Image (cartoon, coloured by chain):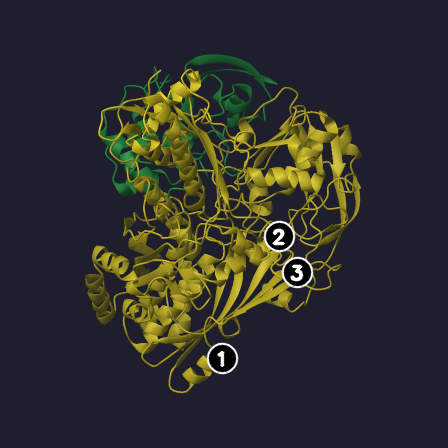
Amino acid sequence: MTRITVKVDGSSFTDEVEPRTLLVLYLREQLGKTGTVVGCDTGNCGACTVHLDGRSVKSCSLLAVQADGHEITTIEGLATNGELHPMQQAFHENHALQCGYCTPGMIMQSIDLIADNPNPSEDDIRLGLEGNLCRCTGYQNIVKAVQAAAAAPQPSAAGGAQ
Amino acid sequence: MTATEERPAAEIGASRRRKEDARLITGRTRWTDNIVLPGLQHIAMVRSPFAHARITSIDTEAAKASTGVVAVITGADIADEQGALPNAWAVIPDQKAPVHLSMAVDHVAFAGEIVAMVVARTAAEANDAADLVDVDYEELEPALELKAAARDEVIAHPDLGTNVSAVWSYDSAESGTGGDVEAAIAAARDGGIVIEQEFRQQRLIPAFMEPRSIVVDPTTEQMTVWSSTQVPHFVKIFIALVLGIPESKIRVIAPDVGGGFGGKLQFTPEEVLTVIAARRTGKPCKYTESRSESLMAAHHGRDQWQQLTLAANADGTVTGLKVELIADMGAYLGLVTSAIPLLGAFMYNGIYKFPAYHLGITNVFTNKTWTDAYRGAGRPEATYAIERLMDELAARVGVDALEIRERNWIKHEEFPFSTVSGLRYDSGNYEAATAKARELFGYDDLRAEQRKRRESGDPVQLGIGVSTFTEMCGLAPSRWLGSMGYVGGGWEHAAVRMLPTGKVEVVTGTSPHGQGHETAWSQLVADRLGVAFEDVEVLHGDTQVAVRGLDTYGSRSLAVGGMAVLAAADKVIEKAKPIAAQLLEANADDLDFSGGRYGVRGTDAGMTMAELAFAVFQGHKLDGSAEGCLDADATLDPDDFSFPHGTHLCAVEVDTETGASKIRSYVCVDDVGVVVNPMIVEGQVHGGLAQGIAQALYEEAVHDDSGTLVTGSFDQYTLPGAPDLPSFEAARTETPATTNQLGVKGVGEAGTIASTPAVVNAIVDALRPLGVTDVPMPCTPYRVWTAIQEGSRS
């Protein structure tokens, strides 16, 4: 077992983890951050996407020990004081989700996308979301949501961790 | 105490943002795999790596000794306990099927079949120990190629003696719904047109985003089963029937369910085995599949060969269609595996009024993952066949693809129309949908551009694909299902309860997994009862709450389940009338119900539903002559199907040098009748289009020569990503259905059914001058390029 200290959605945690534990399983099973989900076992689907020090990562493709000393934001840490993050609001307003399983990863990746490129074209958005699969929406309303969020005033920090 | 005041004039037709979203966008979700219970144990399955083998021995000693392991269970251990999995649809009385065990005992028939399970303290410990289960197999030759399997060249189940499960046919001459197709073909060979073509409906994987998961708590009064399923009510009944547990001792909950597309319309081995593990150990157990397991072992879809003969007069008037199809059941029959081809059987005539039709179906076993419902289920296959053939016919006659359809379709003034396959289409307006699509698409301009590119020999050719479709939705009238050999019914149930504070609880027997029923049903009830949208709470997916129901599939939820909700709401309004009369000291005949209020005609006196609900709660002023309760249940069995239709137009640019296809524009005009929530409807269309386009261009489940699934991860089974799809222009016409009180039809499957032939027609249209008349699906660049090479040689 290895001792790690991480800050997740604004709270600090020190835990013993097996070295083989994936970050996503640490978040879900040890911290109860079940908003972040597992959709595949090959890193293709992106459902598990979170932010590590403000940048999107697929939490199935990192070990928990690699997050030692870092700050993580999950879908559960985005809203501040009950106020939805503009990207969450945009997904709601634009019907960018149906079953909602890909949605946490899709929102986290979309936030990273517009942080990189504040005025993305439709093609930029589609390419920027290439690593996140959705089976319900055909992506069109997701693209619309990202465009809408890009046009909305951005919060100074994404949730609790920056 | 008071209900919310504001409400729009009409909820039905409003693009209400979804109630479901609040938890889904914040991660406060209730996926089955999120559930943790005290003492929860975890299950790992051991699966056969061979497509066809005999199990000669299983050594579980090392696994049992592994840390954290509570039990290792083999098929032999539970041979007397596990029962057999059900098939609910005998398409013929003497349908043949192998016994379908949840866990194989001595014979495995597909790669991925479960041969043992490990129950352990953690999932990691269960998986570690599963690797230590030592299974010896004697490999047998697998039956893999569908046509060879139909000829019994290799037998998938030696005990069965044949691979043929059932042979079923429909003939319009025999059924009295039309003429003799052989005569039509013979006549067409003499001066008319006969088109003979074979299509392959490749094997697909539903690939819902949430892998299946089951949690069973055996310690509760009713054993509680959480499952990521479309059909919690089915699961409850089948646990009872298969495992001999009294139905009254079972509670099934489908919490948040992450997509289904037919793939979770199943009663699964994993459900049975998780119940067995929990029952044997007396502790809660969880099984969550990995994506690799899901792709390998959750049921697949499609997989048919279609042999088609279309007869027409020289002017392109279709005179008959003959279909012979072979359908791959895979290794076993699931719930409705055997009936998937049947659900397409009545749709091969599409929107057309030709006079003769024959269909023969041969259901065949192979040593591959069992197939069953996948979005559209039989109807995409049928629509693909007829819509591809109509394009070929247009080419033979030398007229435009839209023109050939107009010559053959049912005109709007001809409804209701009895089809050659024996259905009664109640309504439709193909002219209106097509005219609108044509305009939005810029059809004539695109045809002009196509001509230019052909004339200039542009290496990038433009193709225009047409698909005019209809489908049968609203599954289904129980009498029809019974006549077709299905064991269940097709009704739906709902309850509506006025609460003392003016809020409303609605219980539905449908089981949404992304469709937005909480929102749409709230709109239905808000409109009907005259209460605020926000005051309605829709409950579903828990058999203790939604005690009766037949769940969600087959574009049935609104047309059947939603109408049951309205029927229950109407009963509440009726029950309120004598109560209002009493409290208002008026004659019931003098009361009018409008805007959520019973008013005394000609006066200002009246009471709202909220006021009546509180008065009923108090009961102080009721004289006992009417039941003091504003709750009602309703069960609704539809009179007939509904028939959505639409015109889809697709422009594809094909690079003739590389074979790469790119969708340039896609316009669809769907007529799904009256629309409750246009935003949700459009979303359903988008997602349906994506899956239909995926069949045309991207997806195929591929097995190698040994029967191993090659496309066993999302690396190889390539769902389209955002860059692989265009933006769609989705519009509507609205011709109300006459088979239900609101005029709705259903939309869940429309996009998937219509889009596949639209895309392939466009690719073939682009390449027709190069001698190409077909490209097998999925139309990968290599296949398109190969078709071009073959076309130019011919």
In-image side of B385 versus B9 (left or right): right
Is residue B273 visible to the viewer in this orientation of the structure? yes
Disc nearest the viewer among 2 and 3 = 3
Mark 3 = which residue? B95
Mark 2 = which residue? B708
Name the spot of residue B635 as percent of width and height, x first: 49, 41
Which chain: yellow? B
Q: Quadrant of residue A1?
A: top right
Q: CA distance from mark 2 to mark 3?
A: 28 Å
Q: Disc 2 on helix, strand or loop?
A: loop
Q: Quadrant of residue B47?
A: top right
> Any mark on residue B343, and which?
none
Q: Amino acid at mark 3?
A: Gln
Q: CA distance from mark 1 to mark 3?
A: 27 Å
Circles 1 and 3: CB atoms closer than 8 Å:
no
- Labels 2 and 3 positioned on one and the same chain: yes
Mark 1 = which residue? B182
Q: CA distance from mark 2 to mark 1?
A: 41 Å
- Labels 2 and 1 positioned on one and the same chain: yes
Q: What's the chain of the residue with tag 1?
A: B
Circles 2 and 3: CB atoms closer than 8 Å:
no
Label 2 vs 3, first from the N-terminus:
3
In this view, the residue in front, B410 or A98, is B410
Q: Disc 3 on helix, strand or loop?
A: loop
The tint of chain A in the picture is green
Q: Amino acid at mark 1?
A: Glu
Q: Name the image quarter holding the C terminus of chain B.
A: bottom left
